[in-house]
Amino acid sequence: MSLQFESAHFVYKPTSTEDEDLFLEIYTNSEIMKFVATPLSFDDATKLYESSLLEWDFQSGKLLTFVIRCKKTDGKIGLCGVKTSDIFTKQGHIGVMLLSKYQSMGFGTEILIALSAFCFNSLGYHKLLGPPVPGNTKSIKMLLNAGYQKEAVLRDNWIIDGQYIDTPLYTLIETDFRKQFTSELFK
């Protein structure tokens, strides 16, 4: 199975040995990470990057990270990915992180729809979960535009800067996604 896919403006490929700079730039940047988690140290980000190079499978429990490249320029604009959270029910957590200069340009929805379609069509997920940090209104808007629905609020679910925070949980079920989006996403 190929772990590469495309959308109208972007190509998505698993991280490779050529992507360390992008990975480190995103995971150590406090501005990018403020709505994700506490920024990682250089050493921790390097370890996470190295683990992203290992072979992935649905049951590995490891994050499958894709580098997002612009078709027009071939420039790298960010990362997206999925991590299996429940093997039996085929659920996975998804995420999108863009370099600062590519945020607020409307790319997130296209990226999330493409990632969701790939997760359902090629990886076999049944349900995808997106738990944005409260206050990240752009991420919530992106989730809603991609068909995700608010399902719950998870109390003390995440830690940012040493503080536990509640996170809303947005989810998307494969059958709902297929009803909402056109057949070209299901090749």
Image: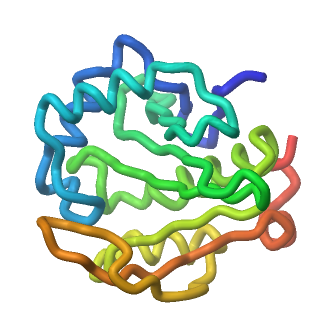
**Residue 73 vs residue 3: left or right?**
left
Q: Where's the N terminus, which quadrant? A: top right
- The quarter of the image holding the C terminus is top right
Given residues 165 and 178, the one toward you in this image is 165
Query: Which residue is at 69% across, 59% downward?
Result: 91
User: Which residue is drawn at the image coordinates 44% and 76% (left, top)?
Assistant: 140
For the rendered model, the colour scheme is rainbow
Q: Residue 155, percent across and down? A: 39, 86
Horizontal side of residue 12 vs 184, given as left or right? left
Count the labels in the image. Answer: 0
As rendered, which of 176 and 75 lies closer to the eye? 176
Q: Residue at x 47, y 44 (%)?
A: 80
Above or below: residue 151 compared with residue 9: below
Where's residue 149, x and y in %? 62, 81
Q: Is residue 27 above or below residue 30?
A: above
Q: Residue 125: percent from the left, percent from the top?
A: 75, 52
* Residue 156 place in picture, x, y as percent: 33, 81
**Which residue is rendered at x = 21% and y = 53% of the image?**
32
